[in-house]
Amino acid sequence: MGIQSEVEQEQAAGCTSKLLSYLLCSSSANASAKRKEKNDSIVEHESRMQETLDEQKRNEWVEARMLHEKISSRGDHFVFAHGPIEDFHRGLDSFLGAPKKLLYEAMEKEFCESDDSNLDFCAGNYGIITNSRIE
């Protein structure tokens, strides 16, 4: 009975081991299939969302175009004009001149000697009446 019992125990242990191995593999394969299914679902959802966003963009563009056509057909619209690209690359200095090198003197002149230097205004952050000469 001793040897037979040991053999039975080994066989039972082997079966248990095989069963455990099968369950783990089966569980792992099942989990992998569920992950793939979930991933596919997420990809499909993202695709639908992108299609919705693209459709919204198209609709917004169509609405903007229709509004543009409506305004343009009245004849009372304006068109922005711009100069050549060279003007852009020359910068503001070419139109306004170089900034003053004596910054504080320029600020004092602007604040104290301008036509509106004595014009009172209410400072929004403090609620006091002041003017640029005082400031």
Image (cartoon, rainbow, N blue to C red):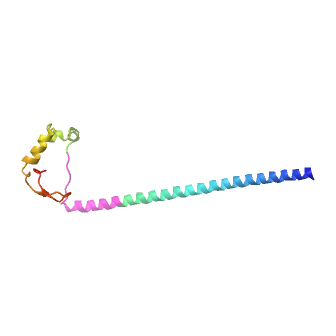
Question: Vertically, is 60 above or below 87?
Answer: below
Of 37 and 75, the residue lying toward us? 37
Q: Where is residue 114 in the image (x, y as percent from the top left)?
A: 7, 48
Of all residues, the one furthest to the top in this rendering is 101
Q: Nearer the viewer, residue 87 or 72?
A: 87
Residue in view at x 43 percent, y 60 percent: 52
- Seen in the image, is 25 located left or right of residue 34? right
* Left or right of residue 52, residue 64 in this image: left
Which span is picked out in magenta? 60-82
Residue extending farthest to the right is 1
Q: Which residue corresponds to the image point at 74% horizontal and 54% vertical from the top-left?
A: 20
Whole-percent x and y of residue 126?
Answer: 19, 58
Q: Where is residue 6 shown, x and y percent of the image?
A: 88, 50
| Total marks in image | 0
Q: In this view, does 45 lie to the left or right of 21?
A: left
Judge by depth and name the residue closer to the eye, 24 or 1: 1
Residue in the picture at 9% in, 44% down: 109
Q: Nearer the viewer, residue 29 or 110?
A: 110
Residue 60 picture quarter? bottom left
Main structural element of the magenta stretch: helix, strand or loop? helix
On the image, the x and y values in percent for residue 4 come to 91, 52
Any magenta on residue 81? yes
Quarter of the image where one finds residue 69: bottom left
Q: Is residue 1 magenta?
A: no
Q: Is residue 91 left or right of residue 49?
A: left
